[in-house]
Amino acid sequence: MAVRPGEHSLVVTHMRYKMKAQQTSVFPGKCHELGIEIEPLPVDLEVVALDATTQKPLGGVEVSAVSLEVKETATTESENGSCRIELPCYASYEVTCRSAGYESYQELLSQPQPNDEVRITALMSPLKGKVSVFVLDAVFQHAVQGATLKVGGEEVGTSDDKGSVSGYLPPGLYAGWELRHGDYVVLEDNAEVEVEPGVVLQLGGEGGTVKMRPREGKVCVKVTGLDRHDERYTVTVAGSEASASLRSRATVDNVSCGENVEVKIRCKGYVAKTLHARVEANRSCDLGEMMMDPHECKISVRTDPEHAQVTIDGDEGKTRTWQGSKIRLGTSYTIKASCDHYDAETRYEQFSRPGQEISVDIDLSKSQTNSEGSEKKGCFGGSAVLQLQGGGMVRMADVRAGQRVLVRDGRYEPILGFAKYNTTAETEFLSVTVRHDGEVGVGPLVVTSNHIVMAVGSSGKREAILAGSITTQSSNSAATVLAGPTGYDGSSVVSVTPVVAKGYYVPVVAGGWLVANGCLCSCYAIYREYLDIPIPVGHFHNILHAATFPCRLWWQWTGYQPPPLDRDHHSDVAANLKQIIAPWLIPLLRFAYSDPSRSLQRKDEPCIDMEAARFSNCPQARLQ
């Protein structure tokens, strides 16, 4: 550009830059190069701050625009919520809006051009309120992890391993809050919750702590040590109970949780147990197997006369107790009572359950002895002879259980056992000599007078009679014919002699009849208590045979062998059996046979001959 020499004023203008004026001198013939810096026009930034929820203008919002070179700030007005800031162009700015109770708003303004008008609308969200709570187990007092907090139906968060749960919510009123956990009862609070912006609200009680009650648990236990399979035990826990049988597990449901929950175990006959367990929610507390101690068992004996001596299982005394493992259920205990001038008695008792108390009444009977002191029983003498299978004979005193002997109808049956025996007692017998086919038999039949034997009546029929009714040939009567093992054969009685001998024996066979000295004899005798009842002798044999059925069945199953002889060399199963059946059998027989209108007997059946069955009519016995 050519200009006249001299002083000149240069003015530079641009639509996006500020005008620039500069004075310069121009000399003739010279070329002047001028460098003029011009400033760009500023950017006009308008910021409008609005509430993001209500869209209302916000006044008092602090607005800042920051670049690497410049930091400009401004504050919005309250009426329209806007403000203006002039910024140099060609730079990027980070525009930030801040206001109390609201979240900060940021926006990037990237290199505005000179003279640009830029408008930013800042939608500012109100600050959220914070809610928090600390969750404890109401029973065990430890932190609860995994509990979910909801406020007004909105999920806030889940408790951590320290039991703390917190979260943010928009300000406002909320309809209550709740805590949920699978192992705990739901904890609810229906009171309204007001959440304020920027404020931490602690729910629950003091310090923001709440306690959740655990759900119910279970208690399991198995009881051993019971001796009977049908025994049941009961487990009680906090009012709930369950029962189970031996070797089964009892489970008590719906048990409130606790650190030391009391558990009571009870069973009839056993000492109750009390223990404590830790019960947790939705879990089963297994106490394992428990041993229970039985209550003591006791046997008490009352005797008549009172001064009688008593031994219980070998120990003297009328009372004895057993405890713990010494109790043997189902095992018989031997009770013996004896007294001078009285017949000794033996009883057998057994405990069926723990804690059982057995009272035994023993009324001893006065001894029935003659002037020489011999006993009066119903049985065979030791010299009576039995025929063995395969040939050979055996004395009654020498026969043993299991030996097969001749019985009714020519058969052979084993000796099952002995209803009673005594090897030393002096006893009154009848020695009956018979004639077989015209010849005297192998020896006299030695039986007591109340023993049942089979005779052949005048009509040729067999009939049961008492040995005391046997007669010999005389001018007034014919000799009794005793039946043999088969058919209706018989042996005439030659003589009947009372004797006294040591020992008496009552072997038992399955059929109830055996052949002694060639004569068919019952295994049973008439008890003296039945002598005044007009009962047919055959009926009485059948009654006794039926009464001994359990004994015979037991002997057959167990292969019975006689127990070792005790100091008195005797055993009396019959006496024990009599104690069981006599109290109800005697009244029954009196009712059935005493009144002819309802008697069960046939007219041609011989009844008990009271005089023949009594021992008092026998001549003076002589000792054998």
Image (spheres, rainbow, N blue to C red):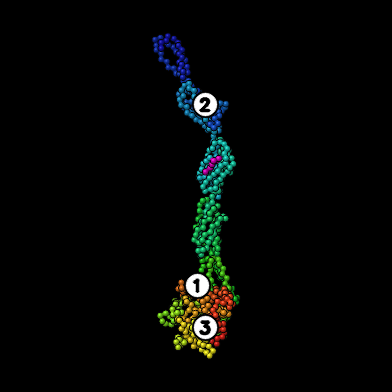
Disc 3: which residue: 467
Label 1 sits on what residue type?
Pro
Residue 150 included in the magenta stretch of the image: yes
Label 2 sits on what residue type?
Val
Percent position (x, y) of residue 80?
56, 26
* Secondary structure that dominates the magenta span: strand
Q: What secondary structure is marked by label 1? A: helix
Nearer to me, 177 or 593: 593
Pointer 2 or 3: first along the chain: 2
Disc 1: which residue: 550
Residue 112 included in the magenta stretch of the image: no
Label 3 sits on what residue type?
Ala
* Quadrant assignment for the N terminus: top left
Q: Foreground mark, 2 or 3?
A: 3
Percent position (x, y) of residue 104?
52, 32
Q: What secondary structure is marked by label 3? A: helix
583 to 499, vertically: above or below: above
Q: Residues within 10 Å of mark 3 (few under 14, many from 20)?
A: many
Spatial separation of the CA atoms under disc 2 and disc 3: 141 Å
Q: Which residues are magenta?
A: 148-153
28 to 430, vertically: above or below: above
Disc 2: which residue: 47
353 to 254, vertically: above or below: below
Q: Mark 3 and mark 1 in contact (Cβ < 8 Å)?
A: no
Percent position (x, y) of residue 198?
55, 35
Q: Residues within 10 Å of mark 2 (few under 14, many from 20)?
A: many
